[in-house]
């Protein structure tokens, strides 16, 4: 079952509000940033607040059990995000070359490794390492959706969205 959070629905508004408030919750943000695994994230009051907020507005009244760990990983990654870029998808940001550079922020090899990741814990580590390369700027809602629904469809969408270099 796909869980989709949109910027213009109650769940999306709650997510963005939680992320914005995280800037003022220095202790909660730091705890999420230091979390080494999903268990640490789930035990954090900041994550629990997000979970409760979303449960109130989701149509089913709860986050599906098989998506809870993915939501926790999204929360931990969002603690690293400094700017919400609502206009760009993650694969585009990972491949967008700056004018003075001929190299993308995330190399095709690193991007391919992310696509090959099936374990959400490994995806968490990989994306946590990618965020600094993007200047800690991503689309908050899109990142959350992609993590919640990580699978073949998301991987394919990312592969089509990434601007692969031309072969010589």
Image (cartoon, rainbow, N blue to C red):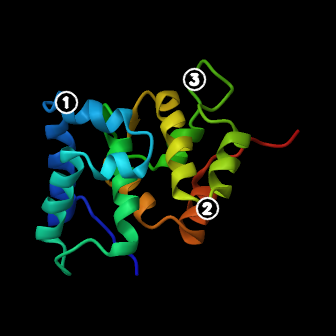
Provide residue 7's location: percent of width, then percent of height: 24, 58
Across the whole image, how many numbered discs are drawn on residues? 3
Residue 58: image location, x then y, percent: 19, 73
The percent position of residue 163, horizontal first and vertical second, equals: 64, 46
User: Reading the chain from its start, which is encountered first: label 2 or label 1?
Assistant: 1
Horizontal side of 18 relative to 154 (left or right) equals left
Q: In this orientation, which residue lies closer to the viewer: 31 or 113?
A: 31
Q: Earlier in the sequence, mark 3 or mark 2?
A: 3
* Nearer-N-terminus badge (3/1): 1
- Identify residue for label 1: 27
Label 2 residue SS: loop
Distance from the alpha carbon under mark 2 to that under mark 1: 31 Å
| Camera-side residue of 17 and 51 | 51
**Quadrant of the frame with the C terminus:** top right
Q: Nearer the viewer, mark 3 or mark 1?
A: 1
Q: Using the image as rendered, state which of residue 68 and residue 81 is in the foreground.
A: 68
Q: Residue at x 19, y 45 (%)?
A: 46
> Which mark's residue is nearer the viewer, 3 or 2?
2
Query: Which numbered marker is on residue 118?
Result: 2
Q: What residue is shown with label 3?
A: 99
Q: Element at badge 3?
A: loop
User: x, y (%) of residue 161?
Assistant: 57, 54
Alpha carbons under labels 3 and 1: distance apart:
37 Å
Pointer 2 with pointer 1, Cβ within 8 A? no
Secondary structure of the residue carrying numbered label 1: helix
């Amino acid at each position: 079952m796909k869980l989709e959070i949109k910027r213009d629905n109650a769940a999306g508004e709650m997510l963005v509000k939680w992320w914005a408030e995280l800037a003022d919750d220095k202790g909660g943000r730091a705890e999420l940033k230091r979390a080494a695994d999903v268990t640490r994230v789930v035990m954090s009051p900041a994550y629990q607040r997000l979970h409760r907020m979303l449960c109130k507005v989701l149509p089913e009244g709860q986050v599906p059990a098989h998506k809870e760990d993915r939501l926790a990983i999204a929360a931990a990654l969002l603690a690293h995000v400094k700017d919400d870029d609502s206009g760009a998808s993650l694969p585009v940001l990972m491949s967008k070359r700056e004018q003075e550079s001929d190299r993308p922020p995330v190399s095709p090899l690193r991007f391919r490794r992310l696509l090959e990741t099936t374990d959400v814990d490994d995806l968490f580590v990989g994306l946590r390492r990618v965020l600094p390369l993007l200047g800690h700027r991503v689309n908050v809602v899109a990142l959350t959706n992609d993590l919640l629904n990580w699978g073949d469809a998301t991987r394919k969408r990312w592969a089509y969205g990434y601007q692969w270099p031309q072969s010589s």
